[in-house]
Image: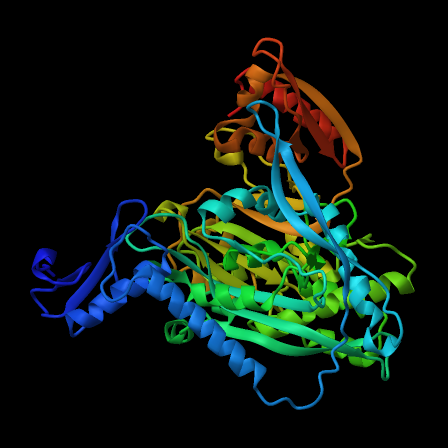
Amino acid sequence: GAMADEGTVRFSGVARDKRSGRWRARYTRTDGKRTWLKDDFATAEEAAEAYDEAVLEDGLAAQPLNFTTREEHAAKQVTKREKRKVEEDHSPSDGADDRPQLKAARTEAAQADAPATEAGNTAAPAYTTTRILLREAIGSTSSVHEMFGKTAALVSTCARLLASDPALEKLVKSLPHKLTKEGWRATGNADSDSTVRLFGIDCEMVLCRRKDTAEMPKQCLARVSVVECTGFTEEGSKRPKPTFETKIDEFVRIPMSMEVVDYMTDISGITQEIAESARSLPSEIHTRLTDLIRASDVVLGHSLAGDFEALKLWHGNFVDTSLLCRIDHMPGLTLGLKDVAMLCVEKGSPEELALAKDFQVSGESHDSVQDAQWSARAVFDLISLAEETDQELPLQQKTLPERFQSRINFRHLPANCSEMVVKALVQKYLQVFGTAADISGIEFRFKRVDGRTPLDRHVTCSVNFPDVASARRVFDNLETVPSGCGNLPRTPPAHRDGFPSVHGTRMKAIPAPSMNSLQPDDQGNDWVQIVRKKRLGSSRQCLVTSFLPVDLSFKETVPIKVGMFGRVIGTQGRMIAAIQQISGARVSVAKQPERSDTIQSGIGELLIEADESSKLDRAKELITQALDLKLG
C-alpha cells in the first residue's frame, strides 16, 4: 500500500502504511537499491529496531541507526562473548578432562603465491597460513594419542593438493579480496604454547537471493555444527575409535534482505518453520567460531570450500577428505562423504560396516552433527586404511563405487516437467522384449532449479537403480537427438553412444520429453496414461549424465589459429558442444596461445579424446567444417 513520507517519522528507515496503519522498515543496500523488510509492525519503535538489526546484520556502514551506535553494538557483542566464556568456564563437568593434549612444537609461516598477475608479471600472495609441526609426546604416552599428530601432518598434504579441487583453489586465490572487501574473517595467530585440537565441521544451506531482484540464487547458511574430537578408544577394534563432543549446533537466521528460493529440505533438513524460528545471527556465529577455533587447531571436513564460503571464514590448518580419496583418470570428480565412509569400512568389522550404511541413508535429509563427526572419522579411517594397505594419501581408487555407476541424472528438463514423465521414460527404456518393467525398486530424486529469469528455470532428476546393469540398459537405450546438437538450429544427429564428460563418464543429449516419445506399448502403461494428460515444455533437448567410465585411449591435438578459436567454441560454447555430441568424442582446449603472440601468429591447440578412432576422425572433420562456417 501507499507509504507515509519518511520525513514525518522521527526514526530512520521507517514509514507507515496508509492503508493498514502498520509500520514498515526499509534500508538502502550497497548497490543503491532500497529494500523493504518482510514484516510489518504495530509501532514505529518496533520497526526502527528491526531496521537497526538489518543494517547491523548486513554491515552497512553508511546507514544511520536509531537506538544504538556501532561502537555500542560492538561492545555488547564483546560483553556477550565474555559472559559466554564465564559460563563455559564455570559449567559443571561430568568428569576430568581426559582429552589428549598435544603441544605445538613450533610454528612456521607458509605463504602460497598466486599465479603471476597480468600487469607487471609480479606474484601476488594468495594467503598466509600457520603450519603446525607436531612432535611425538615425551613421557607418558597415555596423554597423547598418535592419531592427533598423524592427522595434523595431513595439513601440508591438503595444501599440496589444492589444485585438484577447483572450488577450493579459487577460494584460496580470492582470499585477499574476501578478507578485505567481503567481510570474511580468519582465525587468529597461533600461540606456540597452545594445544592443538581437532574439530569436525559441517554446514547446511538453503538457496536464497536478494529480495526484489532477478539475480541468480546462491546458498545461504542455515545451520552450522562443530564437534571436537576429545580422544580415542582402542577397545574391540583394530582401529582407534574417536569420541566427540558437540561444541556448536545452531540454526542460523536468514538475512532480512534475502528471500528463500529453495529450502532444499530433502538434503538440508531445513524447513520454512525451522528457518523462520532460527535466532542466531550470522555475525554471532562468526564470533563463536573465531572464539572457539584457534589458528593452531585443525579443522576437518568434506568439500570444505562450500562450508568456508557459507561461513565467510578462513582457517588455514584444514584437512579435507574430498582431497584424500580420488578416482584414477577422473581428477575432476569428487566422491561424496558417504562413499568415502563406505570405502574406509569395506574390509572392516560388521559393526563398522553397519554404522557406515546407516549414515546418510538415501532419501533422507542430512544431519550436520553426524556429517561433522563422519568428516573427522573418515580422516582417521583413511589414515588407518593407508597404513593397513601400505599406501600413501591421497588414496587413488581404480573404479567408481557401485553407488555411482548405478545412477543416471536427467538435467535441463523443461520447467513444467513432472516426476511422472521421467518415470515413464525410465520404464519405457528399461523394458526387455516388450515386457513392462517394474520400477518400484528405483529411487527418483526430483528437483526444480530456479534461475535468473523464467527461461533459466528447469528440472533435474537423479535416478538411482538397484544395480549397475539396469542403469546401463536405460542409458544405452535412450535415443539421442536427431538434430539441433548444441542447441544449434541445423546439425547432423547426435552419436548414439553419447559423448564423454569432463569426468570421463558418458553423457547423452536426448530430446526433451514429449508425447511422441511416450506412446503406450503393447502392454499398456499406467504411467503413460497419466503423462498423456500433462502439458510438457518445449525445450528441444536435455542432457543425461551417467557414471559409466569411458576409456579415452585415442587422442590427438589439432592446432588452431587464435583468431579462429571463436568459430570452434561458438556462442556460449554451443559449437564445441555440438561437435562433441555429433562425434562422440571429447574436445577441449589443450593450449591457449601465448600472450606475446599476435592475432596473426598465435597458435593454440584443441585436444580430441575418444574410445574409438572413428569418433576421433569424425571430430576432426567437424572442426574443419566449423572453421569453414559449414556446421550449424
Residue 167 placement, left or right of 527: right
Examine the image and state in which quarter residue 606 appears. top right
Q: Is residue 180 above or below residue 12?
A: above
The residue shown at (63%, 19%) is 593
Q: Is residue 405 above or below residue 607?
A: below
Q: Percent x, y for residue 578?
A: 56, 32
Q: How is the image coloured?
A: rainbow
> Of 2 and 489, which appears nearest the observer?
2
Is residue 526 visible from the viewing direction of this image? no
Residue 513 placement, left or right of 304: left
Name the image quarter holding the N terminus. Answer: bottom left
Q: Percent x, y for residue 253?
A: 40, 68
Is residue 91 visible from the viewing direction of this image? yes
Residue 280 placement, left or right of 21: right
Residue 25 placement, left or right of 389: left
> Of 187 and 222, which appears nearest the observer?
187
> Of 544 and 133, which appears nearest the observer?
133
The residue shown at (21%, 62%) is 25
- Badge count: 0
The residue shown at (77%, 75%) is 100
Q: Percent x, y for residue 586?
A: 67, 35
Q: Percent x, y for residue 379?
A: 75, 64
